[in-house]
Image (cartoon, grey):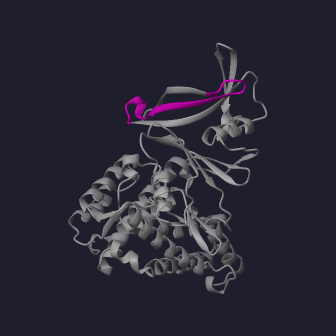
C-alpha cells in the first residue's frame, strides 16, 4: 500500500503571543491519497526559540512566518501552553499544574492540579464522540460508575476535548490482574492459594458490566437484534483491517451465520472496546471508562447498537491477553507456569461470567437459550481476536502471533459445527 497523504484543513490561533498556541485540523487519506479521509486534531506550539528542553519526539522543526522563523512543537508537552489550553476548555478554571498521563494511548490526557483529567481526542468526526455521549446519558439517569463530563469543548458538532474529575483508585484492572499473576508465578501456587487472588475482583467486575448494560439500555434504548446488519458490519471491518494475514473467507463464514439466527437477544449501545485496562478499582466497586469504542472503526459504526455480549467477549479476550502478557515477561516459562497461567485465566473468566449472570435484569437483553448465548459469545470473541491481530500488526508486529493463534484456535473450536446463534 502507498504512504498516506496529509493536508492541513484548518488552523486557528488560540494564543497569539510567543509561545503561540495553534489548533490544527489535518486530513489524512491512506493508500497514497485514494483512501477514505480521516481528520485529526493537533494542538501545536510555535515559538521564536527552539524548545530544546522538550524531548526530540515533541519537536517538529521550524518554518518561516510573517513574524520571523517559528519552531513548532507539541503544545501539550509544554506546561504553559497545556494550562492555557485547559483554560480554553474551562474558561473559569484557575489551573496551576499539569502533567501528562504516560503510556501508549489513542488520545492525549493531562492531569490538572491532581484533581482533573483533560482528555483531548486526536481523531475527530462531525458528530458526538461516544465517550462523551454515553457518559453524559448514563449520568443523566443516575448511573454512578462512570466519570461524567464536567466540561466539553466543541466546535460545531464535534466533541474535541472533555474535562472530568480525577478518580482515586487502586489501579486499572489490567494492573491488578498482572500483580495477581506475578504472585502466582513467583510462588508457583494455584491462584486460589495466593493473597492477591483476583477471583473476587473478577466476579464483582462481571456484575458491574451487567449493571452497565442495563443502564445503557435504559439511557439510550434497546431494539431487537439485526443479525444481517451485525454480520455485514463485522465482514466489512474484517476486509478493511486485515491484509491477507488471516483466513478471511473462513472467518466471514462464521460471521454470516448471524444472518440466519433466530435468537440473538437485544441490541443496545455498548462500551465497544471493553477490557481490563478500561476498568478502575475504586472504593469497593469498579468504574468503567473510555467509551470511545474501537479506534479503527468509523464514528457511525461506533455509535451503532450491538449485543451486550460484544463487551463480554472483549473482556473474555482480555483475561487471556493478560495471562499471555504475564508469561511473556518471564522470557522462557516452563510448562508448570503455563498451566498456572491457564488456570488463572479460566478461574477469573468463570468468575467474571458468574458475576455478569448474577444480575437478573441483564438477561432480558441476551439470547434466551443458553446454547445461543454461548454461540453468539464465541462469534464476538472471534471478532475481538481479529481486531487484536490487526492492531498488533500495525503497532506491535513482534507479538502479532499471539492473537493470530487465538483466531486459529477459535476457528478450530468452531469447525463449522458449533451451535448457530
Residue 156 belongs to magenta span: no
The answer to whether one can see residue 294 in this image is no
Q: Residue 299: image x %, image y %?
A: 41, 47
The residue depicted at 61 percent of the width and 34 percent of the height is 43
Q: Quadrant of residue 215?
A: bottom left
Q: Residue at x 31, y 74 (%)?
A: 367
Query: Which quadrant of the rendered structure holds the N terminus?
Result: top left
Whether 162 is drawn above or below 173: the answer is above
Q: Is residue 161 visible?
A: yes
Q: Position of residue 338 (x, y in %)?
A: 58, 75
Based on the displayed image, in which of its 4 quarters is residue 77 positioned? top right
Location of residue 303 in the rendering, given as x and y in whole percent from the top left corner: 39, 52
Query: Magenta stretch: residue 22 in it?
Result: yes
In-front residue for pair 198/118: 118
Which residue lies most toward the right here?
53
Q: Does residue 258 appear to the left or right of 169 in the view shown?
A: left
- Which residue range is magenta in the image? 14-36
Count up the numbered dots. 0
Instruction: Decide which of 18, 174 is in the foreground and name it.
Output: 18
Outermost residue toward the bottom in this view = 193
Looking at the image, the residue that sits furthest to the front is 92
Q: Position of residue 263 (x, y in %)?
A: 25, 72
Question: Dividing the picture into quarters, in which one does residue 42 lie?
Answer: top right
* Residue at x 40% of width, y 48% of height: 241
At 61% from the left and 79% from the top, the residue drawn is 336
Q: Quadrant of the C terminus?
A: bottom left
Amino acid at each position: 500500500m502507498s504512504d498516506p497523504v496529509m493536508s492541513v484543513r484548518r488552523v486557528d490561533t488560540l494564543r497569539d503571543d510567543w509561545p503561540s498556541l495553534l489548533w490544527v485540523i489535518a486530513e489524512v487519506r491512506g493508500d497514497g491519497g485514494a483512501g477514505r479521509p480521516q481528520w485529526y486534531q493537533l494542538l501545536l506550539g510555535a515559538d521564536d526559540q527552539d524548545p530544546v528542553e522538550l524531548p526530540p519526539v515533541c519537536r517538529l522543526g521550524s518554518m518561516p512566518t510573517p513574524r520571523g522563523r517559528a519552531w513548532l512543537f507539541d503544545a501539550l508537552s509544554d506546561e504553559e501552553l497545556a494550562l492555557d489550553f485547559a483554560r480554553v476548555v474551562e474558561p473559569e478554571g484557575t489551573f496551576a499544574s499539569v502533567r501528562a498521563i504516560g503510556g501508549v494511548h489513542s488520545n492525549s490526557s493531562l492531569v490538572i492540579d491532581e484533581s482533573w483529567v483533560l482528555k483531548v481526542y486526536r481523531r475527530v468526526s462531525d458528530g458526538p464522540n461516544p465517550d462523551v455521549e454515553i457518559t453524559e446519558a448514563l449520568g443523566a439517569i443516575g448511573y454512578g460508575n462512570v466519570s461524567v463530563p464536567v466540561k466539553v469543548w466543541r466546535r460545531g458538532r464535534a466533541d474535541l476535548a472533555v474535562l472530568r474529575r480525577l478518580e482515586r483508585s487502586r489501579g486499572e484492572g489490567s494492573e491488578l490482574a498482572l500483580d495477581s499473576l506475578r504472585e502466582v508465578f513467583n510462588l508457583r501456587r494455584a491462584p486460589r492459594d495466593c493473597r492477591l487472588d483476583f477471583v473476587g475482583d473478577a466476579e464483582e467486575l462481571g456484575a458491574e458490566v451487567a449493571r452497565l448494560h442495563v443502564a445503557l439500555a435504559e439511557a439510550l434504548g434497546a431494539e431487537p437484534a439485526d443479525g444481517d446488519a451485525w454480520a455485514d458490519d463485522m465482514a466489512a471491518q474484517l476486509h478493511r483491517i486485515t491484509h491477507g494475514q488471516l483466513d478471511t473467507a473462513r472467518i466471514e463464514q462464521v460471521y454470516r451465520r448471524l444472518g440466519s439466527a433466530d435468537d440473538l437477544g437485544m441490541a443496545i449501545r455498548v462500551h465497544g472496546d471493553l477490557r481490563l485496562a478500561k476498568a478502575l478499582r475504586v472504593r469497593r466497586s469498579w468504574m468503567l471508562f473510555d467509551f470511545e469504542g474501537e479506534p479503527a472503526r468509523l464514528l457511525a459504526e461506533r455509535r451503532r447498537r450491538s449485543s451486550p455480549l460484544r463487551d463480554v467477549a472483549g473482556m473474555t479476550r482480555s483475561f487471556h491477553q493478560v495471562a499471555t502478557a504475564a508469561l511473556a515477561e518471564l522470557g522462557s516459562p516452563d510448562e508448570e507456569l503455563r498451566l498456572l497461567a491457564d488456570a488463572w485465566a479460566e478461574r477469573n473468566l468463570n468468575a467474571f461470567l458468574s458475576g455478569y449472570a448474577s444480575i437478573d435484569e441483564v438477561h432480558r437483553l441476551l439470547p434466551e437459550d443458553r446454547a445461543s448465548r454461548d454461540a453468539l459469545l464465541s462469534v464476538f470473541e472471534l471478532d475481538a481476536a481479529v481486531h487484536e491481530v490487526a492492531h498488533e500488526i500495525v503497532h506491535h508486529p513482534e507479538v502479532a502471533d499471539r492473537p493470530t493463534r487465538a483466531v486459529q484456535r477459535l476457528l478450530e473450536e468452531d469447525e463449522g459445527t458449533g451451535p448457530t446463534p
